[in-house]
Image (cartoon, helix red, strand yellow):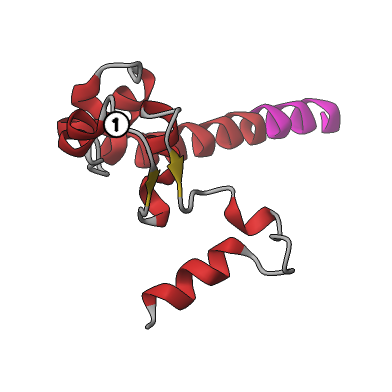
Amino acid sequence: MDKIIKEKFYKLLNFLTVSVFVVAALVYLIPNINQTIQVGQIDNDQRFYCDAGKVKYPCQAIKMLEGKTGNIFNTYEWGGYLIWKLPKMKVFVDGRMPAWKDDFGRYPYAVFLAILQT
């Protein structure tokens, strides 16, 4: 009798555990389903980066800068996008900056923040 009760208890416990995970997943996915679908469809389609995404990138500026040379003084948030779209141009700052120091022992991101505060 004890064995039967334990088996039923563990079956119920397993069912409840799975149910909690399913409900938690649904609670997360239902409000975010549109964003989740968009993330799954990311490719080189400019509309995602220029119109449909949560973050809007400087797509019109890219069109204007294509074919030009020189350096770009950009915001931290746009650096990676600019590197991707304009690989021959050098950006001032991008998301990798906190990881390394320059020849003077300064972090480029700290320099970027100092420039913003002046």
Residue 88, picture quadrant: top left
Viewed as shown, does residue 70 lie left or right of 54?
Answer: right
Name the spot of residue 34 as percent of width and height, x first: 24, 30
* Element on which disc 1 rests: loop
Of residues 59 and 43, the one nearer the viewer is 59
Residue 12, picture quadrant: top right
What residue span does the magenta drawing correspond to?
A: 1-11
Viewed as shown, does residue 33 lie left or right of 84?
Answer: left
Q: Decide: is 70 above or below 63.
A: below
Q: Residue at x 36, y 27 (%)?
A: 85
Q: Residue at x 29, y 31 (%)?
A: 68
Q: Is residue 115 located in the magenta-colored stretch of the structure?
A: no
User: 10 Å neighbourhood of mark 1: few (<14), some, or many (≥20)?
Assistant: few
Of residues 28 and 13, the one nearer the viewer is 28
Name the spot of residue 79 as percent of width and height, x first: 42, 45
Q: Quadrant of the C terminus?
A: bottom left
Name the spot of residue 49 as percent of width and height, x first: 26, 31
Residue type for callout 1? Lys
Q: Is residue 4 located in the magenta-colored stretch of the structure?
A: yes
Label 1: which residue? 68
The rendered magenta stretch, by its main secondary structure, is classed as helix
Q: Decide: is 99 above or below 42.
A: below
Name the spot of residue 110 as percent of width and height, x first: 56, 70
